[in-house]
């Protein structure tokens, strides 16, 4: 059985990804790590919150010890990172949380993947980080 750590799995895109994986891949166990900020919502987990192949953990990717513990405890073989601060307007008024999550948090995930020799690390982003397409 594949064991996947999905970060940001209570957000819109992350929760839909988790829902699809649980529906289409019964051979996968999903550990869903989300800090539940403004973008994460437990209501997004409705319909699969009690699925036997799903474990939700409220936590922060900036907590390197927690990330390591999850990877070890659940014998994770893949990390898929949806956890990010991406709203440009918020980055102007509060840049520190953007640096912490998008740099330090992602580094924690990458180090866990490297240290445990995981099969895959997938970094997901949003169109908002690229800017507008023009007029």
Image (spheres, helix red, strand yellow):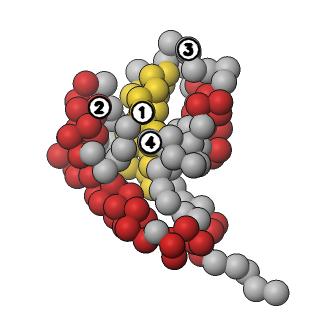
Query: Looking at the image, is mark 2 or mark 3 earlier in the sequence?
Result: 3
Q: Which residue is mark 4?
A: 35
Label 3 sits on a secondary structure element that is loop
Label 1 to label 4: alpha-carbon separation: 5 Å
Closer to the camera: disc 4 or disc 2? 4
Query: Looking at the image, is mark 1 or mark 4 earlier in the sequence?
Result: 4
Q: Which residue is mark 3?
A: 50
Label 1 sits on a secondary structure element that is strand
Quarter of the C terminus within the rendering: bottom right
- Badge 2: few (under 14), some or many (20 or more) residues near its Cα, within 10 Å? some
Q: Which residue is mark 2?
A: 70
Q: Nearer the viewer, residue 110 or 42?
A: 42
Q: Residue at x 41, y 29 (%)?
A: 57
Query: Looking at the image, is mark 3 or mark 1 earlier in the sequence?
Result: 3
In the rendered image, the residue lying farthest to the bottom is 135
Residue 100's place in the image compared with 25, above or below, is: below
């Amino acid at each position: 059985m594949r064991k996947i750590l999905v970060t940001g799995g209570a957000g819109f895109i992350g929760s839909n990804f988790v829902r699809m994986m649980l529906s289409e891949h019964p051979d996968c166990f999903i550990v869903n790590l989300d800090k539940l900020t403004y973008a994460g919502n437990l209501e997004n987990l409705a319909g699969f919150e009690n699925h036997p192949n799903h474990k939700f953990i409220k936590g922060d990717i900036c907590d390197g010890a927690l990330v390591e513990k999850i990877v070890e405890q659940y014998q994770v073989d893949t990390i898929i990172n949806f956890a990010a601060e991406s709203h440009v307007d918020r980055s102007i008024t509060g840049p520190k949380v953007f640096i912490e999550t998008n740099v330090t948090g992602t580094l924690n995930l990458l180090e866990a993947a490297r240290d445990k020799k995981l099969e895959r690390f997938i970094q997901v982003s949003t169109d908002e980080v690229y800017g507008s397409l023009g007029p």
